[in-house]
Amino acid sequence: MPEFLSGFFEGNYAPHGYCLLWRPELIWTHVVSDALIAAAYFSIPVALVTLVRRRPDVTFGKMFWLFALFILSCGFTHVMGIWNLWHGDYAAEAAIKAITAAASVPTAILLWPLLPKALAIPSPTMLQKKNEELAQALAERDKVLEQLRSEVTQRERAEAALVQANKMEAVGQLTGGIAHDFNNLLQAISGNLELIQMAPDNRDKVMRWAGNASQAAERGTRLTGQLLTFSRRQRLEATAVDVSKLLSNMSELLRNSVGPRVDLKVEVAEGLGHVRSDATQLELAILNLAINGRDAMPSGGRLTVSAERGGDEHIEIRIIDEGVGMTPEIAQRALEPFFTTKGPGRGTGLGLSMAYGVARAAGGDLRVDSVAGAGTTITILLPPVSDETDGAAAVAASDKRAVPAKKVDVLLVDDDPEVRQAVADMLRADGHHVRESENGPQALLELERSPPDLMLLDFAMPGMNGAQLAAQALDRKPDLKLLFLTGYADSEAIDQAVDGSAQILKKPVSAGSLAAAIEKLLG
Ligand code: ADP
Ligand code: MG
């Protein structure tokens, strides 16, 4: 055994009491004190371990274990102190001291770096204060939120007012434009009628003048159609629309609208098929887009209107111009209603949004491709449908003058004497027998006197309107045939009054479509 270790395991050491000369007061003071210290040291680790095990969230848990070991071995050194008063086991005492040292040194070393962290742990008082601060911050945030909410409401109100103002401006522009166009039309109509009155016997000239006047009237019809679309009074008539035919029929209108400076090309493949849309609206949408193209080319250029089957089986109508194009910012907003870059009095900002609405209503979409300075392509994508010609379309299409097969007794009700007389004359020219009433009550009396084959009635009349008259008339004569002639088709009111069984014709009505409608009702 090496010299160094021999001291631990050999030798006969005197017990510690011997050094104390076995003086009882010293011996027992040592014993009692060491026993008390040891007991205290043994109890502390139990408390520490219990704490760490019960509260896993306690920080520095490992440190507590180490500390418990250190205290425990301290306790054993004191037990050894008592033992060695009577025995000389100094090797065992040294070993226990060594273990205590081994536990104490890391405990002491580890304690220092932990100190700042331990100091950073908030005390309950500090936590309480922080909590109060947090509660206050939350209350402040709630206040700011409340304020923000009221600001948003205010802004929404302001925006609504702005939209309303924009609408009013648009309506003003539209009304002004329409009044201007109408004056021109009325000039053409009244001028030609005056010419006829001045030279009624010159048959050739009369025919030409009458032709000019009816052409102007037709233009007026188109115009009011657009107006009614705008005011949403128009009965939306989604039918199967032949795209190729619609576009070919439009080329003259397009040419007139874009003017001579624009080189218009209409490239429409034949037999593209049908889409489900309101023909008038679709026409108006394309017209709007062409006019945008014209506006984008103030000094002229090429405008192409094309239609073809797209790769994904959609029918694609394109309006392509070589004009100023749009910046990304404008392109992004172009579809917004009332968004316009054209000064007041020039743009309404409704063209593109209306076209988009028509495309969506037909189950399709509208795409804007534009580069500033390099022109614009607007694509209307429409899903094709099968050709199902329905009644309304048939009536509108047969505008030709047919000789009526059957002469019938017609009761005509309209409060406007000029309209009434013109329609009555049309009917009489076809050989029908016509009775005229200028209001509902009069018509009901006439009906009582002798029921007609057909009642032709206006919708908007003072007192009893057309729908009310129809309802009362049907009460008396349930199988009475009804044909509405109306300036704007408030179709819901009419449908409600007559269960949708009545026919509706839009004013102005031509003699041809009037005859066709009567034929359809009674034939
Ligand atoms: P408006 O023509 O009355 O301004 P639109 O809805 O038709 O309203 O168009 C909105 C805006 O989009 C226009 O003011 C214009 O700035 C832009 N825009 C539309 N079409 C074109 C186009 N073909 N080329 C360049 N810009 C266009
Ligand atoms: Mg426009």
Image: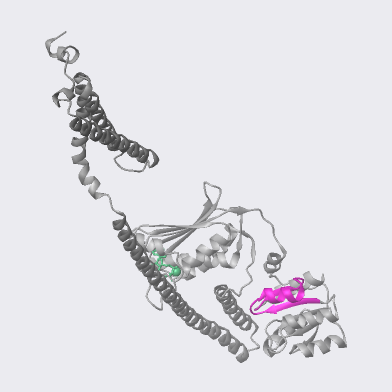
Magenta residue check for 356: no
Residue 502: in magenta span: yes
In the rendered image, which quarter is residue 47 located in?
Answer: top left
- In this rendering, would 508 be left or right of 331? right
| Residue 251 in picture, x, y percent from top left | 52, 64
What stretch of residues is rendered in magenta?
A: 481-507
Residue 160: x %, y % from top left: 45, 75
- Where residue 287 sits in the image (x, y, percent)? 50, 67
Quadrant containing ligand 1: bottom left
Whether residue 512 is visible: no
Q: Residue at x 21, y 39 (%)?
A: 111
- What residue is drawn where x is 52% and y is 57%? 365
Q: Residue at x 69, y 76 (%)?
A: 493
Q: Is residue 127 above or below residue 80?
A: below
Q: How is the image coloured?
A: one colour
Q: Quadrant of the N terminus?
A: top left
Q: Nearer the viewer, residue 299 or 412?
A: 412
The one nearer the camera, 197 or 323, is: 323
**Above/below status of 446 relative to 100:** below
Residue depicted at 74% across the width and 89% down the height: 439
Residue 317 at least partly seen: yes
Give the total number of marks visible in the rendering: 0
User: Which is more toward the observer, 322 or 9?
Assistant: 9
Question: If the image is split into quadrants, where does the C terminus sit?
Answer: bottom right
Tell me: 297 left or right of 446: left
Along the line of sight, which residue is nearer the eye, 212 or 238? 238
| Residue 69: quarter of image | top left
Residue farthest toward the top in the current orientation of the protein = 1
Question: In the drawing, does residue 271 fall left or right of residue 296?
Answer: right
Estimate the x, y position of residue 425 in percent, counting from the top left: 73, 84
